[in-house]
């Protein structure tokens, strides 16, 4: 990400910190904590912010309705379109309970995420990864949580440094103010991340 941000700045923004930050955090996207350089949509979602919380995945080979590509195990299929004379004529149910558990999840009360300092901006775990690692589709994997936390810690330190270099005031970017507050909470509540601050500062 460090390389990406530096390269973007150099190639597309005349090596100018403010121009790059302005392009990321316009008024329109500020409310949504649009922290680019994340592999998923970031925002104050009450559901999973990857596609699993918002879309149905249809497996073209057999027209099965899957939660997503990585969770398309037989026991997790929501159902399957039924076909007659080459036309879809109905749907056969399979695991409808899982569909309602996923689509109606409120991640503010989801175990582990409910009292996590970064829950406002996190995608709340990958259900496929969780199932494959722990056999529990809904409970976040610690190593993945740590990756999310260090990602946001990095972004905060990087953007803070860019603002400091050019005397840019953070009040221009409400999204970055929120990010900064959340990272302070993270460092206060989980001291294990403190050594990462020095490591990242040396890197950027
Ligand atoms: S870091 Fe882990 S516990 Fe925290 S919100 Fe994300 S998935 Fe949930
Ligand atoms: S649960 Fe994991 S694999 Fe499925 S859409 Fe979300 S991030 Fe991707």
Image (cartoon, helix red, strand yellow):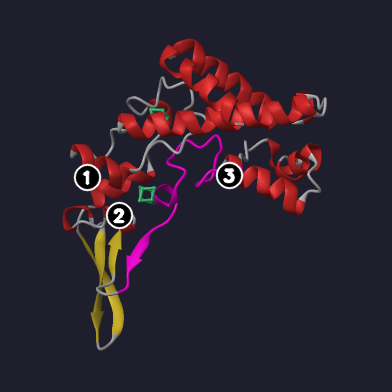
Q: Nearer the viewer, mark 3 or mark 2?
A: 3
Quick check: is the Cβ at mark 2 less than 8 Å away from ligand 2? yes
Identified at 70% across, 37% down, the residue is 30
Residue 149's place in the image compared with 34, above or below, is: above
Using the rendered image of the protein, determine whether residue 121 is visible from the camera's viewpoint: no
Identified at 67% across, 43% down, the residue is 6
Which comes before the other along the chain, label 3 or label 2? 3
Residue range in magenta is 36-60
Contact, mark 1 vs mark 2 (Cβ under 8 Å): yes
Which comes before the other along the chain, label 3 or label 1? 3
* In-image side of 30 versus 191 (left or right): right
Which comes before the other along the chain, label 1 or label 2? 2
Whole-number angstrom distance, CA of label 1 to CA of label 2? 9 Å
Q: Position of residue 38 (x, y in %)?
A: 54, 43
* In-image side of 84 versus 7 (left or right): left
Which disc, if any, is residue 37?
3
In the picture, the quarter occupied by the C terminus is top right
| Viewer-side residue, 124 vs 84 | 124
Residue 133's place in the image compared with 7, above or below, is: above
Identified at 78% across, 41% down, the residue is 22
In the picture, the quarter occupied by the N terminus is top right
Quick check: is the Cβ at mark 1 less than 8 Å away from ligand 2? no
* Residue 32 falls in image quadrant: top right
Q: Secondary structure at mark 1?
A: helix
Which disc, if any, is residue 132?
1
Q: Which residue is mark 2?
A: 70
């Amino acid at each position: 990400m460090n390389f990406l941000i530096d390269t973007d700045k150099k190639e597309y923004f005349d090596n100018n910190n403010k121009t790059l930050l302005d392009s990321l955090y316009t008024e329109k996207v500020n409310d949504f904590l649009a922290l680019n350089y994340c592999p998923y949509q970031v925002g104050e979602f009450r559901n999973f912010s990857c596609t699993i919380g918002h879309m149905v995945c249809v497996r073209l080979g057999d027209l099965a309705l899957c939660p997503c590509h990585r969770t398309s195990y037989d026991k997790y299929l929501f159902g399957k379109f039924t076909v007659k004379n080459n036309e879809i004529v109905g749907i056969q149910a399979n695991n409808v309970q899982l569909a309602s558990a996923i689509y109606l999840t409120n991640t503010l009360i989801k175990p582990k995420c409910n009292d996590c300092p970064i829950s406002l901006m996190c995608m709340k775990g990958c259900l496929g990864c969780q199932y494959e690692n722990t056999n529990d589709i809904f409970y976040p994997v610690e190593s993945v949580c740590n990756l999310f936390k260090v990602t946001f810690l990095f972004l905060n330190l990087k953007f803070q440094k860019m603002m400091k270099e050019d005397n840019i005031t953070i009040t221009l970017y409400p999204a970055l103010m929120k990010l900064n507050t959340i990272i302070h909470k993270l460092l206060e509540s989980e001291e294990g991340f403190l050594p990462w601050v020095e490591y990242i500062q040396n890197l950027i």
